[in-house]
Image (tube, rainbow, N blue to C red):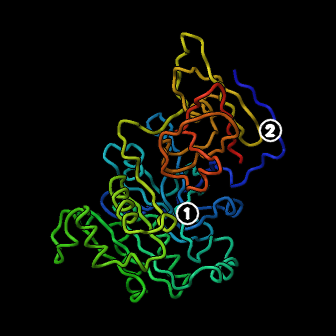
């Protein structure tokens, strides 16, 4: 049984509520044989809801072959009023990405969640609706910051937004990019990367690493493994002079980069990272409020959650190992989530009371964990009752 009661007035939302709005597709532009850039129109009345910082993402929701699917995609441009652009690369076996590459056309309508995510720069850049903040931020932050990014495949998407914004907003900042792909034909935003090189020849540099093509420099040929990474850091990049690092790609590459930077004494707060997935194929994402089996012994745990000022209680069979997100979805279909794999952070909530365990976390920052926030898609109660607040 589920009960909905008003939450105390003190439980107000501290950050923007994750909600879906229907947006019209303005354009679908082919980037490579397996990727497209999709531009959505944002009407004036929704521009405040779709304000964003470079590096953030949106979740898309569509009904495909009778199934409602949602996927998260990074925004690929600097903030522009009236539109949102994302890049979608076709994954092998990916239903949503294949549909977007083969069937999505201008004029279609999709449900789009307002932007979120913490993969953003601390350099002086701003969102599209608050340009007045730029001067204040520039005073507090280094105008000559040096940023370095590693991207693989579609991991370039948020990096493009960050690089464009940093180079435009900070006249003395520099940006160096290492971009890994199988071949030159797989390079997304090749023309835009070339434009950045032409526009900022002294402040932007890119090193294309191709795993299946021979390049003149052997350092830029093959996969980025531990040996190649060491050489890149020793002879090409300058870790000791870098103010921010951005890592975006598959789990194995991002973890290799994080470990190597940590071993070189790079402070954790200087390293931002985002993953394609958790690298755990044995734990498929995408919970939709699955059914759970009753415990033969009758033992249940209570999961209480507050969302949009309403508090609900769900009885969860103790033997089911049910996550907070799954239990909440059985009660309310509008509970926020996108990847359900511990990567995006959309399902973030604060633990008010009760014991819990969280399996994976690739989205929450250290300070968020210290303040009691969890990813509800990865969190299970360990006691008789767990209370969480999505509005906190």
Residue located at (50% from left, 71% from top) = 162
Q: Earlier in the sequence, mark 2 or mark 1?
A: 2
What percent of the width, then of the height, locates residue 385? Answer: 66, 28
Residue located at (42% from left, 85% from top) = 203
Please indicate whether residue 16 sits to the left or right of residue 30 in the image.
right
Residue located at (36% from left, 75% from top) = 191
Q: What residue sits right under mark 1 in the picture?
A: 84
* Mark 2, secondary structure of its residue: loop
What percent of the width, then of the height, locates residue 110? Answer: 55, 49
Label 2 CA crowd tier, 10 Å (few <14, some 14–19, many 20+): some
In whole angstroms, how far apart are the C-alphas of marks 2 and 1? 34 Å
In this rendering, the answer to whether 100 lies above or below 220 is above
What percent of the width, then of the height, locates residue 223? Answer: 23, 62
In this rendering, the answer to whether 233 lies above or below 275 is below
Q: What residue sits right under mark 2 in the picture?
A: 7
Q: Nearer the viewer, residue 137 or 155?
A: 137
Please indicate whether residue 270 sits to the left or right of residue 7 in the image.
left
Please indicate whether residue 243 sits to the left or right of residue 352 in the image.
left
Q: Nearer the viewer, residue 247 or 197?
A: 247
From the image, which quarter does the N terminus lie in?
top right
């Amino acid at each position: 049984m589920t009960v909905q009661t008003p939450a105390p007035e003190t439980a107000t939302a501290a950050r923007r509520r994750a909600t879906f709005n229907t947006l019209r597709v303005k354009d679908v532009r082919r980037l490579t044989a397996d990727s497209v850039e999709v531009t959505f129109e944002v009407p004036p009345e929704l521009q405040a809801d779709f304000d964003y910082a470079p590096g953030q993402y949106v979740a898309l929701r569509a009904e495909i072959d009778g199934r409602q699917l949602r996927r998260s995609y990074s925004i690929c441009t600097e903030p522009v009023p009236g539109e949102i652009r994302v890049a979608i690369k076709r994954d092998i076996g990916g239903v949503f990405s294949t549909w977007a590459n083969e069937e999505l056309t201008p004029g279609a309508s999709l449900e789009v969640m307002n932007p979120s995510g913490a993969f953003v720069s601390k350099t002086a850049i701003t969102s599209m609706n608050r340009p007045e903040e730029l001067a204040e931020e520039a005073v507090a932050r280094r105008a000559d910051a040096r940023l370095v990014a590693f991207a693989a495949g579609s991991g370039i998407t948020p990096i493009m937004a960050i690089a464009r914004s940093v180079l435009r907003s900070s006249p003395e900042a520099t940006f160096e990019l290492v971009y890994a792909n199988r071949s030159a034909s797989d390079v997304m935003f090749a023309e835009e990367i070339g434009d950045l090189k032409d526009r900022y020849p002294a402040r932007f540099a890119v090193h294309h690493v191709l795993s299946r093509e021979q390049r003149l420099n052997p350092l830029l040929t093959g996969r980025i493994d531990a040996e190649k990474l060491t050489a890149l850091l020793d002879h090409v990049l300058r870790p000791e002079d870098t103010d921010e690092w951005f890592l975006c790609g598959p789990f194995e590459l991002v973890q290799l980069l994080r470990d190597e930077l940590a071993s070189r004494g790079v402070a954790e707060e200087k390293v931002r990272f985002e993953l394609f997935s958790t690298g755990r194929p044995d734990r498929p994402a995408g919970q939709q409020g699955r059914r759970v089996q009753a415990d033969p012994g009758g033992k249940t745990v209570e999961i209480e959650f507050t969302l949009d000022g309403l508090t609900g209680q769900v009885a969860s069979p103790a033997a089911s190992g049910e996550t907070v997100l799954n239990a909440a979805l059985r009660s309310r279909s509008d509970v926020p989530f996108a990847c359900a794999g511990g990567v995006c952070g959309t399902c973030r909530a604060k633990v008010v009371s009760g014991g819990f365990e969280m399996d994976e976390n690739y989205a929450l920052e250290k300070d968020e964990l210290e303040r009691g926030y969890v990813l509800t898609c990865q969190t299970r109660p360990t006691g008789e009752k767990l209370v969480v607040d999505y509005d906190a």
